[in-house]
Amino acid sequence: MHTPPGAPAALPARRRTRLALALLTAVTTTAVAGLTVTANAAVPPPPSGWSLVWSDDFTGAAGTLPSSANWIIDTGTSYPGGPPNWGTGEIQTYTNSTANVSHDGSGNLRITPLRNASGQWTSARIETVRSNFKPPSGGVLAIEGRIQMPNVTGAEALGYWPAFWALGSPYRGNYQNWPGIGEFDVMENVNGINSVWGVLHCGVAPGGPCNEFNGLGASRACPGSTCQSAFHTYRFEWDTSVSPQQLRWYVDGQVYHTVTQGQVGEPYWTQMTSHAGYFLLLNVAMGGGFPNGVAGFTTPTASTVPGRPMVVDYVAVYSRGGGITPPPTTPPPTTPPPGGVRDAYATIEAESFNAQNGVGTEACSEGGQNIGWLRNGDWARYDNVEFGATPPRDFVARVASGAGGGVSGLVEVRLDSPTSPPIGSFALANTGGWQSWRSVPGNVAGPTGRRTVYLTFTSGQPNDFVNVNWFTFRR
């Protein structure tokens, strides 16, 4: 995702040009004709011993966007403040247009690259709202998707770059901590080649234990039908039940790549496994370091054909074993129901956010849930907060912190945008533990009417520094 300072743009993070060239000799390019085969399989029930943690079956009406409770739609050519061209050299602009991303009405999501009359490309990239996918302690996490790659091959496919992958949650709001926070590429493909690439990124760049900017990767042809002509099931497992721990990549149940804890080593394994977890992404890029490196020239070209979608039947996360269950799924907002009005002067439960960045939820010692793992750049959004005609004098938040010595930060209130100037804040350091709660006030400057409220979190250190149970405003 991110090209580290001093890294050449031609070798961006997450894109393995040298690896791709090395693997290309083992991959067969197959020209496939015919129409996309549409399937509508439900999310498979978990096998014995496994539990379903989270899923999306993409059963929305034709022409609708993916669920905002499950997915954030990225737009533009970078994260705000992040590296240009998403750190990869890809050339398209991501949009939230249903022409680029929508349900097809048959149980699938389609991400479709398009080119306009001026030659400009658009496409789509979505990432899960939830960012704390990780195995239960001593157990196994599985990330799985049933996907048909864009059904295009040969010269017409040059520059196509579909992907299904996961990034460590600390990347949200930072963009300078790759590859240390970890990246699992469950499925990648370029230029319509009949091959799936599975890759781990970790450690430092360039070089390091994951051989950045290539990563530790492997590829193979899709079993039976080509990757482009049919659906295949792509799966990644993170297994903490064995020693050393393992990361495994599968296509249609066949393992083709394994990385062990010993290969990565310390402190790098701990850096990518000890944070709150991972969020999942689906996208189709056009051009950039990986497809260019495989082709040996700049892609896409005049021969590249637009309009061939990546079709996603389902995405699911499963877990097995372990003595501790994985963090709970972030529930949809229930106080108030979506679209309802919130009373600024009543208790607003922190976990009832309408959207978030880098925020996890957990059981709270005071009952219910709190939001946690909060650090610099994280935020939570609360829609339709009604202040009335008389502005509040301050706000109060119920907070706790188990941050280490010297780690502190600001809990801030902003209106309408997470980057607006704060209208109020207070500083917080260790309160005696992550469930040692106290109510802390902070003055605010005069909101009235109905507004969108953001709780934002700012710190000079990259560490988690606060949990929040609830907040309210006072006149």
Image (cartoon, rainbow, N blue to C red):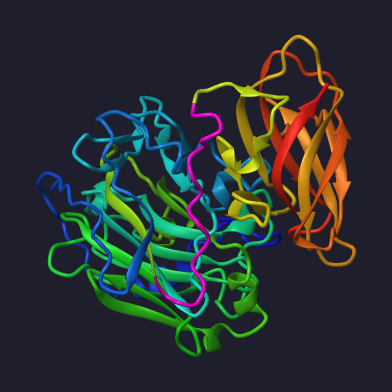
Position of residue 325 measured from the top left corner of the image (x, y, whole percent): 49, 68
Quadrant assignment, res 295: bottom left
Give the vertical position of 51 relative to 362 (above or below): below
Quadrant assignment, res 320: bottom left
Quadrant assignment, res 229: bottom left
Give the vertical position of 304 relative to 325 (above or below): above
**Residue 3 visible in the displayed image:** no
Residue most toward the top? 389
Image-based side of 427 in relation to 4, left or right: right
Q: Quadrant of the C terminus?
A: top right
- Magenta stretch containing residue 24, yes or no? no
**Residue 180 visible in the displayed image:** yes
Give the vertical position of 464 relative to 456 (above or below): below
Q: Residue at x 82, y 21 (%)?
A: 392
- Magenta stretch containing residue 327, yes or no? yes
Image-based side of 445 in relation to 294, left or right: right
Position of residue 114 measured from the top left corner of the image (x, y, whole percent): 34, 34
Q: Where does the magenta region start and end?
A: 320-338
Position of residue 340 measured from the top left corner of the image (x, y, whole percent): 53, 23
Q: Residue at x 56, y 67 (%)?
A: 182
Image-based side of 99 in relation to 5, left or right: left
Residue most toward the front? 367
Give the total of numbered labels: 0
- The one of 37 and 345 positioned closer to us in this rendering: 345
Position of residue 389 measured from the top left corner of the image (x, y, whole percent): 76, 9
The secondary structure making up most of the magenta span is: loop
- The one of 385 and 102 positioned closer to us in this rendering: 385
Q: Residue at x 46, y 77 (%)?
A: 322
Q: Quadrant of the N terminus?
A: bottom right
